[in-house]
Image (cartoon, rainbow, N blue to C red):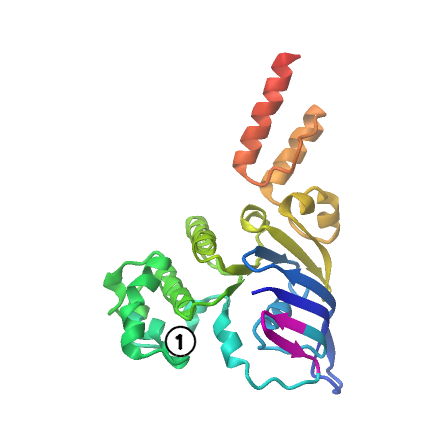
Amino acid sequence: MDIVFRDVEHRYQVNTPFEKRALYDIHVDIRSGSYVAVIGHTGSGKSTFLQHLNGLLQPTKGTVHLGDYTITAGKKEKQLKPLRKKVGIVFQFPEHQLFEETVEKDICFGPMNFGMKEEDAKARVREWLTLVGLSEDVRHKSPFALSGGQMRRVAIAGVLAMEPEVLVLDEPTAGLDPRGRKEMMEMFASLQQQKRMTIVLVTHSMEEAARYADEIIIMHQGTIVRRGTPEQIFRHVDDLLHLGLDVPETILFQRAIEQKFGVQFDAPCLTMEDIVQSLQMLFARVKRT
């Protein structure tokens, strides 16, 4: 499912003294099957942007095309339920949305709400649990008896059970320890490859954006100020710092090496593996001279 925003603006509380412009001049295309990270400060418009991806919010100006669906400002859309099946959103702390008495019932709730028969939904619970790295022995347990990380995986399985074409992730690793964050992000990367789904990741973590995304969109004060591949974005460290954004630790380490030794690496080092490879190439050049 391709996603296209054209001249999109969104204002809250229109025609009241509290009217506020949250988005403006949004022109962006997100290709089907791509992995896009959206970064920016709190208040930059990220959450408002992502809520336009399945019609939770509708533009006050412009048009949003989501596959075969078109949402146009000023036109009330009535048939958004099928769209919301195709675009699943995992909000921050999704485990807070668990409510059923067993894991199985919680995962089956979404598909059954969209018309799947109960026996068909139950027959696929094992598949959905496997996708999020959980074993079948949790299916009859209360989700509230599980660990925090397991609860989050159950909540995500409930979103995946609706078989979305697009998965929107709003700070999905918030509150997890480093190991939990890495496992969660690796799980999403694996899902994207297996299911060929589009992923839109909203994150404050530059490391996550650099490692996993095909493309990065930077938002600032309600609009898109930069977009490009991770390599393109992180070549311009000063621009990011000027916007008050962090950069990956590997980029800062690379910059320190370049300044100390008066050298220039061929490309931004987005991971520790990149740092090691670049240093090996640097040492090889030194030996030859």
* Predominant secondary structure, magenta span: strand
Q: Quadrant of the N terminus?
A: bottom right
Return the x and y of residue 79 as percentages of the image width and height.
Answer: 55, 84
Q: How many marks?
A: 1
Query: In the displayed structure, would residue 187 be above or below residue 146?
Result: above
Q: Front-most of 177 and 150?
A: 150
| Residue 68 colored in magenta in the image | yes
The residue drawn where x is 68% and y is 47% is 233
Residue on which the image places disc 1? 110
Left/right of residue 191 with respect to residue 58 in the rendered view: left
Q: Residue 34: in sight, yes or no?
A: yes
The residue drawn where x is 34% and y is 74% is 108
The residue drawn where x is 63% and y is 13% is 288
Query: In the displayed structure, would residue 144 be above or below residue 19?
Result: above
**In the current view of this chain or complex, which residue is farthest to the front?**
68
The residue drawn where x is 57% and y is 86% is 78
Q: Front-most of 96 and 91?
A: 91
Return the x and y of residue 197 as percentages of the image width and height.
Answer: 50, 60
Q: Which residues are magenta?
A: 64-73
Query: In the displayed structure, would residue 79 be above or below residue 227?
Result: below
Left/right of residue 194 with respect to residue 42 in the rendered view: left
| Residue 126 colored in magenta in the image | no
Q: Residue 102: in sight, yes or no?
A: no
Q: Quadrant of the C terminus?
A: top right
Image quadrant where residue 134 sits: bottom left
Q: Front-most of 147 and 103?
A: 103
Image quadrant where residue 163 sits: bottom left
Left/right of residue 231 with respect to residue 113 in the rendered view: right
The crowding category of the residue bearing disc 1, from other C-alpha atoms within 10 Å (few below 14, some 14 to 19, many at least 20), is: some
The amino acid marked with disc number 1 is: Gly
